[in-house]
């Protein structure tokens, strides 16, 4: 899936909560999102 270039990491995290992703941890500007739906899956995004 292609994401818009002007989408911030925070906006992405908010959008992914609709798909059962939760913020697992944050280190600096990087956010790690995790879901348990259909097996464990992680996404890392820049928070800015």
Image (cartoon, grey):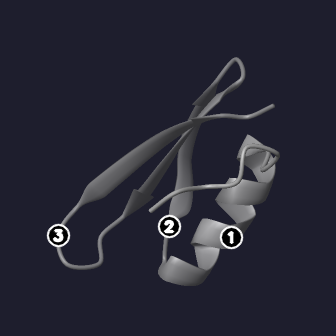
Q: Label 3: how many residues lie within 10 Å, few (<14), some (14-19) or many (20+)? A: few
Image quadrant assignment for residue 12:
bottom right
Residue drawn where x is 61% and y is 73% of the image: 17
Q: Is residue 41 above or below residue 9?
A: below
Q: Is residue 40 left or right of residue 21?
A: left
The residues bearing labels 3 and 1 have C-alpha atoms spaced at a distance of 20 Å
Do the residues under discs 3 and 1 have CB atoms within 8 angstroms?
Answer: no
The residues bearing labels 2 and 3 have C-alpha atoms spaced at a distance of 12 Å
Q: Which residue, given by chain and number where applicable, does mark 1 sit on?
A: 15
Q: Which residue, given by chain and number where applicable, does mark 2 sit on?
A: 21
Q: Is residue 21 left or right of residue 9?
A: left
The residues bearing labels 1 and 2 have C-alpha atoms spaced at a distance of 9 Å
Specify which label sits upstream in the sequence, 1 or 2. Answer: 1
Image quadrant assignment for residue 26:
top right
Label 2 residue SS:
loop
Q: Is residue 11 left or right of residue 46?
A: right
Where residue 37 sits in the image (x, y, percent)?
Answer: 29, 78
Where residue 34 sits in the image (x, y, percent)?
Answer: 41, 56
Q: Which residue, given by chain and number where applicable, does mark 3 sit on?
A: 39
Marks 3 and 1: which is nearer the front?
1
Where residue 2 sits in the image (x, y, percent)?
Answer: 52, 57
Residue drawn where x is 81% and y is 31% of the image: 48
Instruction: Give whichever of 15, 21 is nearer the camera.
Output: 15
Residue drawn where x is 68% and y is 70% of the image: 15
């Amino acid at each position: 899936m292609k994401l818009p270039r002007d989408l911030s990491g925070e906006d992405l995290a908010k959008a992914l909560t609709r798909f059962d992703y939760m913020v697992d941890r944050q280190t600096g500007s990087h956010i790690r999102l995790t879901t348990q739906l259909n097996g464990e899956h992680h996404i890392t995004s820049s928070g800015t």
